[in-house]
Amino acid sequence: VRIEIVAVGTELLLGQIADTNSKWLGENLAANGVTSHFHQAVGDNHDRIVLALRTALARSDGVIMCGGLGPTQDDITREAIAEVMNVPLVRDQAIVDRIASFFEARGRTMSANNARQADVPQGATIISQTAGTAPGLVCPVGNKVVYAVPGVPYEMTEMFERAILPDLRARMAETGEEGVIASRVLRTWGASESGLAESLQDRIDALDQTGEVTLAFLASGIEGIKVRITARARTLRDVTELLDKEEVEVRRAIEQRLGDIVFGVDDETMEVAVANRLIAHGLTFGVAESLTGGLIASRLVNVPGASAWFRGGVVAYDSQVKFDVLGVPAGPVVTEPAAAAMAEGVRKVTGADVGLGITGVAGPDDQEGVAPGTIFVGFALPDRPTETRQLRVPGDRERVRQYGAISALDLLRRTLDAPPS
Amino acid sequence: VRIEIVAVGTELLLGQIADTNSKWLGENLAANGVTSHFHQAVGDNHDRIVLALRTALARSDGVIMCGGLGPTQDDITREAIAEVMNVPLVRDQAIVDRIASFFEARGRTMSANNARQADVPQGATIISQTAGTAPGLVCPVGNKVVYAVPGVPYEMTEMFERAILPDLRARMAETGEEGVIASRVLRTWGASESGLAESLQDRIDALDQTGEVTLAFLASGIEGIKVRITARARTLRDVTELLDKEEVEVRRAIEQRLGDIVFGVDDETMEVAVANRLIAHGLTFGVAESLTGGLIASRLVNVPGASAWFRGGVVAYDSQVKFDVLGVPAGPVVTEPAAAAMAEGVRKVTGADVGLGITGVAGPDDQEGVAPGTIFVGFALPDRPTETRQLRVPGDRERVRQYGAISALDLLRRTLDAPPS
């Protein structure tokens, strides 16, 4: 069953609110094996809602319309559906009574407008309201179906799970289509999208033969590139098995060509990857930042439970702060020795087990004769000599800082995985 | 000119990422007087992209396609546009060379796949790339137009402003459709949307009479609420005059009811507002952060030229770091005296003129018997006693930190404006 989502509301077109409903519906349709080939957003205009709905019905088996069921004059989804069904709207007195009692229970009087929410296209059935005032609708159009739900997220999700999903499942059972689709995302840092694609070309070719598993790449800016594994099967258990098996293959292929670039799965951020390693080794952490100016620290404190291992940091933006607070020797500060001294200094100042120091040039101008995008990172760990690394990152000032922060965290992740040299 | 946005990417349909591009484009088209009646999202499938594009062209004057210009096999927007234009793709050697030198500059070799990004539908013109590798496209289709831009947000927004918007303006001038539409945004912090709307109700009523100037409110999460003034007139000069005049009225109405809550205009962030005041007073700055963990410092170093006034900071996440590095007296650390001591301590440690200290509870649990969302801020300024303020902010851990950071900067802005008490 292919379902198109049509989000209704001029505020969506004007970008005044983000269309989180379509995202949620897309995710939940996919997780239940329902295909969605198109989404549309349309404003509060009768003719254009009708056109969007007809367009959607022509290329899908059904449509979920989200929004435009409220009480005001610009809520016209009901009218548009009735036109497409070619039937009149009929006011349902039972719904009018229910809305009136909803208002009464809150000590308010129902305004006349609210009765519009009881208008039902002839032949449609109701998804009764539990949270707000507007009921949802299930509207047959030939052998296809139009579902209408309110745009308020918690009303929409509740009706989807209670009424739409069971109805879709019944339709899928009829067509013998049933199944589950699920995805898993491997997050990488440090490779190009094309390099990743090449490392996985053999897997993609092999998977093309069977069609039950697919791979896709998703460039995510400063968060790196994601590899998405999607599988389809009859049961959740079968899907999970397919994902597990393919994850092993994908990791092996990437590792072989590009090394240890997979840092997390699904929602696991780089800072979570670092935190997990610090916790596993029982180490506390402190960071000295120059060009990143607190970015690394602020990412780390976002990890729940950070207080168990994060001691703090020094933002040593001015050179004098590097000398006075961190004990960096006077002289040039965009150098490997300065990064090493920052790492050792912050380790001492914060009393942490592990210290990271980062210095470099964000740009736009050179500093100490060093070009923008040049970054030095130092790592001071217990029982081994302080290590340093040089990085070159692209982009403007803001991106140099963002790339510098995640690159330094990635190097820390690898350093914590490596045995002392 | 009516423009439809078509976002390309299976990850959008699967709800794996939010379609922030369409929201941004919708907002920026509207701000420039361009109408958008429909948005679509479509997956990485040739036939369906072609169908979405044909559907969009049939009901609009032009289309902005976002995404699917990358180097991998599932990036097929170029092919789909060529099919709709009914022309072949031609590889542009100049673009191939530019991409190759992009890789060379980073010490990497261009893979064969990347050359696909140099494929151009015959008859299309290029929007040259400044940030990534894929150029954008301007493709004539009869008397309509298809723009294609990468899905990476900063590449998309840059190309929109540099190439698409000027092209749209030229088209609008040709059709004699408009004079000039321009907007100005006043950024506020600390008022509710309904409070702001009430303070401006008289202005809105007065403007409704004429129709040449409109006001809109745009809730922008942690960046506060924006009041957008939009004016339409025959020439840029007339529009600017209307905007200048209305800005005075709007500021007066807001000030009267809600006080000094306008901190910036258009792109002027809170950190820029603070920087301007530090520069005006010739003061340097240092910050000591506990719950915000480097957020304030990292916002400040984003201001161009920050090195002239930003000395650095201490992220004192662990209490011991507060005691040892900042000289906070041993004892409870989520208090007004601790915030004051942090401000004075960081002023001394960084050698800055002005010190800010911030401590509080991000949650989810109480700390020292203090509830989540409680924040204490201290300000140490030359020639006046250290001041402290208590704040209560709503939300989860992440939002408490973000609200705390901007609230503290807003208090600093007001403190720098106030004469010593």
Image (spheres, coloured by chain):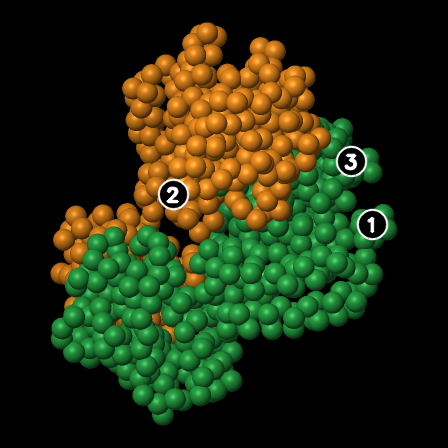
Chain colours: A orange, B green
Amino acid identity at mark 1: Glu
Q: Check the residue under mark 2 and report the chain it is in.
A: A
Q: Are marks 1 and 3 on the same chain?
A: yes
In the displayed structure, B21 sits above or below B309; it is above
Amino acid type at mark 3: Val
Q: Residue at x 45, y 16 (%)?
A: A167
Provide the chain ID for the residue under circle 1.
B
Query: Badge 2: how crowded within 10 Å, few (<14), some, or many (20+)?
Result: many
**Mark 1, mark 3: which one is toward the viewer?**
1
Q: Position of residue B200 (x, y in %)?
A: 60, 63
User: Would residue A65 be visible to someone looking at this image?
Assistant: yes
Please, what is the three-letter code of the amino acid marked with disc 2?
A: Thr
Write down the residue under mark 1.
B177
* Label 1 in the same subunit as label 2: no
Q: Is residue A386 left or right of residue A161?
A: left
Question: Residue under mark 3: which chain is it in?
Answer: B
| Frontmost residue, A168 versus A374 | A168
Given contact means CB atoms under 8 Å apart, are the residues at marks 1 and 2 in contact? Answer: no
The mark lying in front, picked from 2 and 3, is: 3
SS type, badge 1: loop
Q: Is residue B202 above or below residue A185?
A: below
Residue occupied by mark 2: A188
| Residues marked 1 and 3 touching at CB (< 8 Å) | no
Give the label on residue B141, or none: 3
Q: CA distance from mark 2 to mark 3?
A: 39 Å
Residue A156 appears left or right of B140 = left
Q: Nearer the viewer, residue A90 or B27?
A: A90
Mark 1 to mark 2: distance in Å? Answer: 48 Å
Element type at marker 3?
Answer: strand
